[in-house]
Image: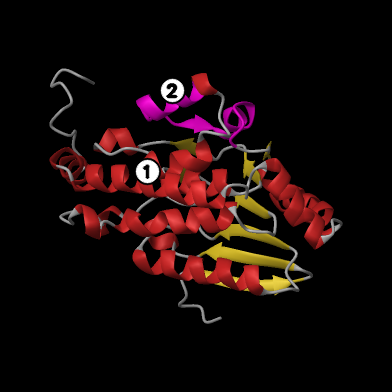
Amino acid sequence: MTTDKLVRYAVSGGIATITLHSPGNRNALSARLRSELSEGLEAASQDDGVRVVVLDHTGPVFCSGMDLKETRGAAAEDQSVNEFPAILHRIVTSPKPVVAKVGGPARAGGVGLVAAADVAVAVRDATFAFTEVRIGVVPAVISVPVLPRLLPRAAHELFLTGESFDAERAARIGLINMAVGTEALDTEVKRYTDMLCQGGPAALAATKDLLGQRAGSAELAETFGAMLELSARHFASEEGQEGMAAFAEKRKPNWVPADNP
């Protein structure tokens, strides 16, 4: 593929590597990136030669979440988040195991991508956060893959505060599988992909069913639909628009008490 792609796709040795390649805006989930990511996931799903999918990135940030420039001023039905459930659903329901290779921070929708994957490996200095509430929106869509991963007490704390946390804690609460040194990331991801390639393709798909990752696809789609409605409504709300404006202008939103540090 040409270098102007925001998502690169390559297959080697049965591994399809889908690389987010928009480092200039921290791999934000712009409309174009979402479209190309969907295309890559579909290509991997349809290729019988692909055994495992690796979700990778270029630049220091794995994914910063939705591209807020595309959400400001849009009505609920035109919000960019509207297309995101289909991407998460495709990852979750993929008959081929998906490994997230996280070499830097993930925020909001980026954490959703990590949670949707079957296996996630991150460098120790990667950070994660559910920052939605801090800009007046709700982490509704990503809650579908995220909440089954997290310890309940941690979910309440982190969803409500928006506080960032490191990869070591992400592993302890179930968001990722392993936190490793930067120099070990490639090796650890390869260790997982090598093991996954040892499994029969049909057996792996059936085992994902057994684990509940693909079971109840219709119910899963319905849940995503309900969460999308909630999310889009808050993105378009007065509070959400104020929060995004404040973020862009690097100021506190108007609901933060004046004496709050």
Q: Are marks 2 and 1 in contact (CB under 8 Å)?
A: no
Query: Farthest residue toward the bottom?
Result: 2
Is residue 250 within the magenta segment?
A: no
Q: Is residue 187 visible?
A: no
- Image x and y of residue 45, in percent: 64, 68
Write down the quadrant of residue 33 in the picture. Answer: bottom left
Question: What residue range appears in magenta?
Answer: 154-175
Residue, x 15% and y 21% (percent of image)?
257
- The residue at which mark 1 appears reads as 227
What residue is shown at x 75% (from left), y 53% (from top)?
A: 206
Q: Which of the marked residues, 2 or 1, is nearer the chain's N terminus?
A: 2
The image quadrant that residue 161 belongs to is top left
Residue 19, visible in the rendered structure = yes
Q: Residue at x 75, y 73 (%)?
A: 49
- Which residue is farthest right? 198
Disc sitting over residue 156 in the figure: 2
| Residue at (38% x, 59% y) in the render | 83
Q: Quadrant of the C terminus?
A: top left
Seen from the viewer's position, the closer of residues 12 and 199 is 199
Distance, label 2 to label 1, CA atoms, is 17 Å
Which amino acid type is marked by label 1? Answer: Met
Colouring scheme, one of rainbow, by chain, secondary structure, one colour? secondary structure
- The x and y percentages for residue 86 are 46, 58
Q: Where does the N terminus fall, quadrant-wise?
A: bottom right
Residue 89, position as x, y percentages in the image: 51, 54
Residue 171 is covered by the magenta coloring:
yes
SS at mark 2 in the image = helix
- Reply above or below: 165 against 114: above
Q: Crowding at label 2, few (<14), some or many (≥20) Cα neighbours within 10 Å?
A: few
The majority secondary structure of the magenta stretch comes to helix
